[in-house]
Amino acid sequence: MTAVRIALPNKGRLNQSAIRLMNRIGFPVPDASNRTLLAEFSKGRYQVLLARAQDIPEFVEMGAADLGITGLDLVKETGRKVESLMSLGFGRCRLVVAVPDDSKISDLQGIRDGCTVATCFPNLTKAFFSGMGKSIEVAEVSGATEVAPQVGLADVITDLTETGSTLKLNHLKEIGVILESEAVLIGNRKAMEEKKARVEEVTSAIQSVMNASRKRYIMANVPKSALPNLEKLLPGVSGPTVMNIIGREDMVAIHAVTNEDEVNGVITMLKKIGATGILILPIERMVL
């Protein structure tokens, strides 16, 4: 069987997070700065291809890559026929509609038919305004969209933003959201049938990392008298694990998994029931 090839962004906002994800599933992907465009792992069973994020949907659809990590915005913009396998929890941003701070346009309804909109996302932009029943002119640019109003190219823009700080820096205000985006794993439909076992190895490994990223492993010594309430306090994956402690009849050791955002509250509750030796550990991977 030929190698499963995974395409990753070679630069930009998704690059480092995608590489870290690959590292966590056992693929020590080289940094893009060393100019290695194709790397092999597991004795050639897997390959990682570094490419432009905007090209990855096309690479996956055409079979140049079996799997790929790119932005949902780029998948939607290109309209490529690929399978969306999972959201990856990083690279979150929004494709927004924005106008200059001093513009008389205060909301989407204020945009007139025939208005020129500057954007790097012409397809998503046209579809959005068409869905609103508005006819606009699109000025397609390849970057620095936020300066378009300053140079008289357009009165309205659509652009990606994470925090909105770049818009504010360029004296722009957001008046609408076209798309909420983040990094996604996509797959080639044919490869998912012909290389099913190996593709599932990769997707399962990535899913296990995603599962683990939002969880923490808790260990503590707890009075036996507190056990009746412990399952409600620490439901874990299938309930907490309880083990005897040598030489102690009054205490047991418990192991459990909890959500990362609940850890502080769990620690407080464990202390209230007399728990000692509380340890909180990260989880590398978790297969459900």
Image (tube, rainbow, N blue to C red):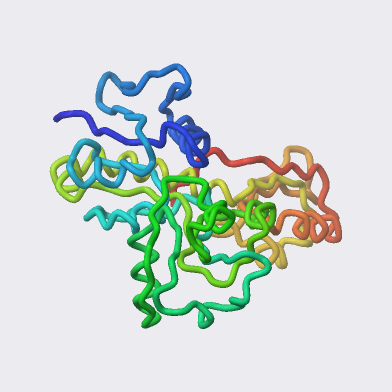
Q: Nearer the viewer, residue 170 or 59?
A: 170
Q: Name the residue located 25 percent from the left edge and 45 percent from the top edge.
A: 58
Q: Is residue 170 rendered to the left or right of residue 198?
A: right
Rendered location of residue 200, percent (x, y): 28, 44
Rendered location of residue 97, percent (x, y): 52, 66
Q: Name the residue located 49 percent from the left edge and 61 percent from the top edge.
A: 154
Q: Is residue 15 above or below residue 30?
A: below
Q: Name the residue located 45 percent from the left edge and 17 percent from the top edge.
A: 34
Rendered location of residue 247, percent (x, y): 78, 38
Q: Is residue 251 visible?
A: yes
Rendered location of residue 77, percent (x, y): 34, 57
Q: Is residue 199 above or below residue 256?
A: above
Image label count:
0
Q: Quadrant of the N terminus?
A: top left
Which quadrant of the view contains residue 53?
top left
Q: Nearer the viewer, residue 127 or 281?
A: 127
Q: Is residue 58 above or below residue 108?
A: above
Q: Nearer the viewer, residue 172 or 18?
A: 172
Q: Name the residue located 68 percent from the left edge and 57 percent from the top edge.
A: 168
Q: Is residue 72 visible?
A: no
Q: Is residue 19 above or below residue 192?
A: above
